[in-house]
Amino acid sequence: MSEAQTFIPGNLVRLADRKPHPEAGGRGTGAFTTILFPPGLEALRDERNKEPDCFVDLNLDQVVGAAVARRDEEVLRPIFHSPCRSEEVVRYRQAVFADLERPEIFGIFPQFGEAMRSVHANLHYAGEISTGSHRNTVILRAAGLYCEAIAAFLRNLAALDLESEGLAGLHAYLADYARSPSFLALARETAAQREALSRVSFGMLFSGDRVKVRKYASEPDYTTIILDRFAKFRESGIAPPGPAKPKDDFSLNHIEEAILEFVSRLFPEAFGSLEDYVSRQGNFIDEVVARFGREIGFYIAYLDFIRPLRRAGLPFCRPIVSASSKATAVAESFDLALATRILAENGIVVGNDFQLSGPERLLVVSGPNQGGKTTFARMFGQLHFLAGLGCPVPGNAARLFLPDRIFTHFEREEDIANLRGKLEDELVHLHRSCQAMTADSVVVLNEIFNSTSLDDQIFLSTQVLERILAIDAIGVCVTFLDPLSTLSEKTVSMVSTVGPEEPARRTFRIVRKPADGLAYALSLAEKHGVTYAKLRSRVRP
């Protein structure tokens, strides 16, 4: 008795045009080359893979980690690690952010980004395929998606009123690129190849565990016959039995790959043409388009990160920046990392102001513990770093200096590995910082030399601050030592405040006023448990 045989017509495009798993140039013209740097300043690019030394102290590691989560971190982190001192570069990026903050503009970029991710996923998948016919059809699919993505993105850009030099330059570049002979040839040949392959029809004859592939000869399509037979079940709401769904639709299994290879032998002319197409057009992604696809993620990631904060009513602004003037003023700003946590807990974020003008260079912040001093210092550092990236910064308004580097010193646990004591560790770290800092640096110091006696603490702290002031760097110093706030005309005293009727209640407001002489006394009282609140809890009527 012969084995049962079933004949099923096949379609080449349906078989080969599977999407790969999602994990799976340079021919345009024009001045635009990057969305991060204006034309002529591309040489200022200096991206670093390593986190800046100040990141952990300023909690910027938390900010950037949250912003790039579930994105291409290898591409985005170096951009977030690399602020720039060029006012022109910063303003170029600020203008791009301003455009992207308009919903009608921002909305077109996720669509383009998703299309380009699909293109790259296809190409990545093609690189893992061993059979030439399968690999070539996947590359053809990627090229088709690429051409469609460029055309759609260009149409969307043309419908918008772009104000930034960056996005206007991108639009002009893409318009030129889409008219270039290379892109027109790619689009034309890609469409022709897909049309030619769509006309390739074949049949599969199943006999037991064997499959025979041959040219389609008008045999009946059993798929259509079976669907007709079960039509009445569809009308009654009962779904007809169907083939088991594959585990995914990202790739061909080994049987499907073998079938495609047999089909390529049946139609050598079509597949030979495809092979020639891939050899000429396989490297089809334009270098500038590819770079833009990576770099735009920097803007989108940051705007997505701050969107919940804005929705909660917290202000952001594009600061006035300068690489020469150290006049600094900020209104209603806050620590980004802390604000994110507070809002997650339905808390209230308190904003603060500060200003440096004329000869003023150093904010000296004193006041009781847990009053927001360290948060204020982190905010100061975050603002200057984010300004150098060109990002919107927390606050209603801001004027900020663009530093060459940010130096931080926050209290750390003693490192027993280096056989040095805590005080010596601090001295070594601060000595290195003072040697490396320049007049263009920003310094953030948080309660230095707390491990020594009061007299030594005053002496050592004074030496460090005088060194910073002599260099003419700007910064902030959190301390309990009131004399540090009056070292010179370059220092500005700021104090964390408490409730006027409840001294134990912190307002988290840091205001500009002379130190009141109570900060160190309060710190000692808290250390020994003899504050007003603690004494009152012990003495009950």
Image: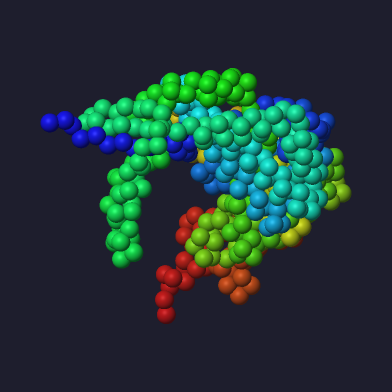
Q: Camera-side residue: 402 or 244?
A: 244
Q: Hey, which quadrant is residue 12 in on the image? A: top left
**Residue at 29% across / 54% down in the picture?**
229
Please state if 465 lies on the left or on the right of 233 as rendered: right
Q: Is residue 312 above or below residue 112?
A: below
In the drawing, does residue 320 fall left or right of residue 380? right
Outermost residue to the right: 358
Could you say which quadrant of the image residue 81 lies in? top right
Q: Residue at x 75, y 53 (%)?
A: 159
Q: Tell me, yes or no, if residue 457 can be seen here.
A: no
* Left or right relative to 315: residue 228: left
Can the viewer see residue 106 in this picture?
A: yes
Who's the residue at 65% across and 53% down the image? 107
Q: Please provide percent x and percent y for residue 287.
A: 68, 29
Which quarter of the picture shows residue 442?
top right
Q: Position of residue 24 (x, y in %)?
A: 46, 33
Horizontal placement of 498 versus 439: left or right? left
Q: Residue furthest left?
A: 1
